[in-house]
Image: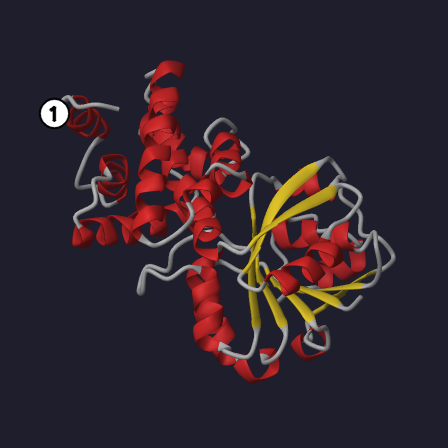
Amino acid sequence: MTISVLGGGAFGTALAITLATKGPVTLWARNPANMQTARENKARLPNCPFPNSLTVTGDLDEALVAKTVLLALPMQKLRDFIRAHSEALAGKSLVACCKGIELSSGAGPVQIITEEVPTAQAAILTGPSFAADIARGLPTALTLAVADDAVAQRLQAELTTPSLRLYRTTDTIGAELGGALKNVVAIACGTAMGAGMGESARAALMTRGYAEMQRMAAYRGADPDTLAGLSGFGDLTLTCTSEGSRNYRLGLSLGRGEPFDAGTTVEGAATARAVAKIAQDAGLDMPITMAVAGLLDKSLDVKTAVHSLLTRPLKEE
């Protein structure tokens, strides 16, 4: 087994830790020195020691010896990174481990990989998961989406660990959208809770937000059943109900009128803007997404956003 994980954030580190329980894994990070010395990621994932089979490096060439490469990089930086290293990534199995829609193009991670490295086997790993749970060996199930099912079966066997169970699908578009769009709904739910609107309001936002997810998935040619799985409904449930989610915490801060740490990557913020543009151009009815985009761009305040949702024309569910 030759696996490398690119990205020393919490999620990339967690994946490297669990995969290293099966065999040698290389974790590439831009600033690896502290992790190499401490044998843990104290900054992003404290109290999760590295197995002996996990090698940490700042040498990208060393990491790219692997045939299977997990890309645990920020969504909005994924294309630039892949384009800069396209020759070294050619012919490999590239597994995106980020969730979102590219703001500049409206593309998801698998589409970006396919466009930039046509010879690669493009995949995405997504679903309900917190990095700390994975790193500590707590039971977690994710979706692995690859267009070629033979490749999916090989990667499924390679990336499944005793505590990390993978289910596979060939619907890469559905898996991409489930992981991306649930972040937007999580911001909406956090906003509602932060503003003191209550659990009933959150349940309504989750349900109607899920309807918006299905609407966008159908528009982009995904299988609706994919959205009912781990990458859609499963991830929606986790992200909309826990302060372990950065997207939910951003929503809480919006609802409370409090500042949010600008250094924290929140993929749902860019995704909300990207999806709002797609929906507007396509004439899709996605009022929750539009409200979240308005809150983030400060063209709406919370009171106005709530009023706009509650005064929409009455209709069938």
Which residue is at a point 28% across and 40% down the rendered structure image? 289
Which residue is at a point 22% across and 36% down the rendered structure image? 287
Say left or right for 31 vs 280. right
Q: Is residue 26 visible?
A: yes
Q: Quadrant of residue 292?
A: top left
User: Furthest-bottom residue in view?
Assistant: 87
Say left or right for 102 vs 134. left
Residue 145 appears at what percent x and percent y?
56, 55
In which quadrant is the N terminus drawn?
Answer: bottom right
Say left or right for 179 vs 11. left
Residue 141 appears at what percent x and percent y?
65, 40
User: Furthest-right residue in view?
Assistant: 52
Q: Amino acid at mark 1?
A: Pro
Which residue is at a point 45% across and 30% down the rendered structure image? 240
In which quadrant is the C terminus drawn?
Answer: top left
Q: Residues within 10 Å of mark 1 (few under 14, many from 20)?
A: few
Which residue is at a point 68% across and 68% down the rendered structure image? 68
Q: Is residue 266 visible?
A: no
Which residue is disc 1 drawn over? 313
Closer-to-camera residue (210/221): 221
Closer-to-camera residue (235/194): 235
Closer-to-camera residue (192/68): 68
Q: Quadrant of residue 173?
A: bottom left
Residue 244 appears at what percent x and percent y?
55, 34
